[in-house]
């Protein structure tokens, strides 16, 4: 594994034909993406494994592969590796149910920026949250860049990755976890609702917010009161502000 820094490059990678093949064959390895020099016969076993595990892959130039690997001896194969192992949705819910306190989960609908995800992990840990849920597709995964931005919080915050965010919201509801969407258009302030019961707080992507198909499944919608001329916050800031409102209410109830 070799570290690599860059704005649009992975910061934790595996490279080399046999190394990446072994990783793809191991169910315990979380591979976020695969880059290849060609799609000819030699690489077919890799693309077959990637398809079976629903791992995106693409063909890149030799120069880009050199940059991605940070090494010229990559044999035309580079893979981006998650910084830690994921839970699945049901595993996280099972783990949360074993606690003797009201649940506090953060559900992120298609967050793209690794710095936002890392900052959110820090806030979840600081506010006593119990886990984060992210979708498998169209969202940043647990890259080393996310781990760095979390300043160590990823070691303490369980992360679940789910195929369908809306279905996870329904799973929460079946377990009597109230699902609350943070929506700038909501009429109700988050300070005017009871946040002391078991909660899954749902936040949308940086540009588009929560997708309508997910939003309509949530039990309630609330907004963060805004006093200035700008009516929105960066998603990581919105998560932090909301989590500490939850912490404030829960501290007042004890």
Image: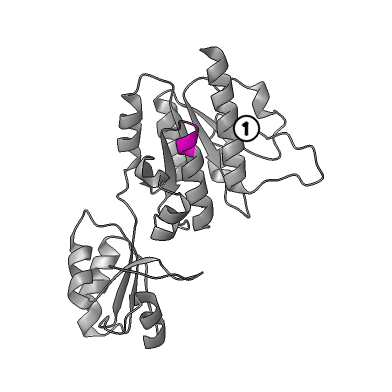
Classify mark 1: helix, strand or loop.
Answer: strand
Quadrant of the drawing holding the N terminus: bottom left
Is 128 a magenta residue? yes
Task: Quadrant for residue 207, please give it.
Answer: bottom right
* Residue in the image at 60% along x and 53% along y: 206
* Residue in the image at 53% along x and 52% along y: 116
Most extreme residue toward the right, as rendered?
229
Q: Is 232 situated left or right of 176 in this image?
A: right
* Residue in the image at 24% along x and 79% along y: 43
Viewer-nearest residue: 216 or 207? 207
Q: Is 188 situated left or right of 8 in this image?
A: right
Against 233, is 216 above or below? above
Where is residue 245? Give x, y as percent.
Answer: 60, 28
Task: Quadrant for residue 212, please give it.
Answer: top right
Q: Is 178 situated left or right of 175 in this image?
A: right
Most extreme residue toward the top, as rendered?
254
Most extreme residue toward the front, as rendered?
151
Against 7, is 128 above or below? above
Is 36 a magenta residue? no
Task: Quadrant for residue 141, please give it.
Answer: bottom left
Where is residue 197? Give x, y as percent.
Answer: 50, 20
Where is residue 165? Give x, y as percent.
Answer: 45, 44
Q: Coloring scheme of the render?
A: one colour
Q: Residues within 10 Å of mark 1 (few under 14, many from 20)?
A: many
The magenta-colored residue range is 124-129
* Residue in the image at 58% along x and 36% along y: 181
Viewer-nearest residue: 109 or 216? 109
Viewer-nearest residue: 126 or 112? 126
Can residue 210 be seen from the camera position used here? no
Which residue is denoted by mark 1 in the rendering?
221
Can residue 224 be seen from the camera position used here? yes
Where is residue 171? Give x, y as percent.
Answer: 40, 33
């Amino acid at each position: 594994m070799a570290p690599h820094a860059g704005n649009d490059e992975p910061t934790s990678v595996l490279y080399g034909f046999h190394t990446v093949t072994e990783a793809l064959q191991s169910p315990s390895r979380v591979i976020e993406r695969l880059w290849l020099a060609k799609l000819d016969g030699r690489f077919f076993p890799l693309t077959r494994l990637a398809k079976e595990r629903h791992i995106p892959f693409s063909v890149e130039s030799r120069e880009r592969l050199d940059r991605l690997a940070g090494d010229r001896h990559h044999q035309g194969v580079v893979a981006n590796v998650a910084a830690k192992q994921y839970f699945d949705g049901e595993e996280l819910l099972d783990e949360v149910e074993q606690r003797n306190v009201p649940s506090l989960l953060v559900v992120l609908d298609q967050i793209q920026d690794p710095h936002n995800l890392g900052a959110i992990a820090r806030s979840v840990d600081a506010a006593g949250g119990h886990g984060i849920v992210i979708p498998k597709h169209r969202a940043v995964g647990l890259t080393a860049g996310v781990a760095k931005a979390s300043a160590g919080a990823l070691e303490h915050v369980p992360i679940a990755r789910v195929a369908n965010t809306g279905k996870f919201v329904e799973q929460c509801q079946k377990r009597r976890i109230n699902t609350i969407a943070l929506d700038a258009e909501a009429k109700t302030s988050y300070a005017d609702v009871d946040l002391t019961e078991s909660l899954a707080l749902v936040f949308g992507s940086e540009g588009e917010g929560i997708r309508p198909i997910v939003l309509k499944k949530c039990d309630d919608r609330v907004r963060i009161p805004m006093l200035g001329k700008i009516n929105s916050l960066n998603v990581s800031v919105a998560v932090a502000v909301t989590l500490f409102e939850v912490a404030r209410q829960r501290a007042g109830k004890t």
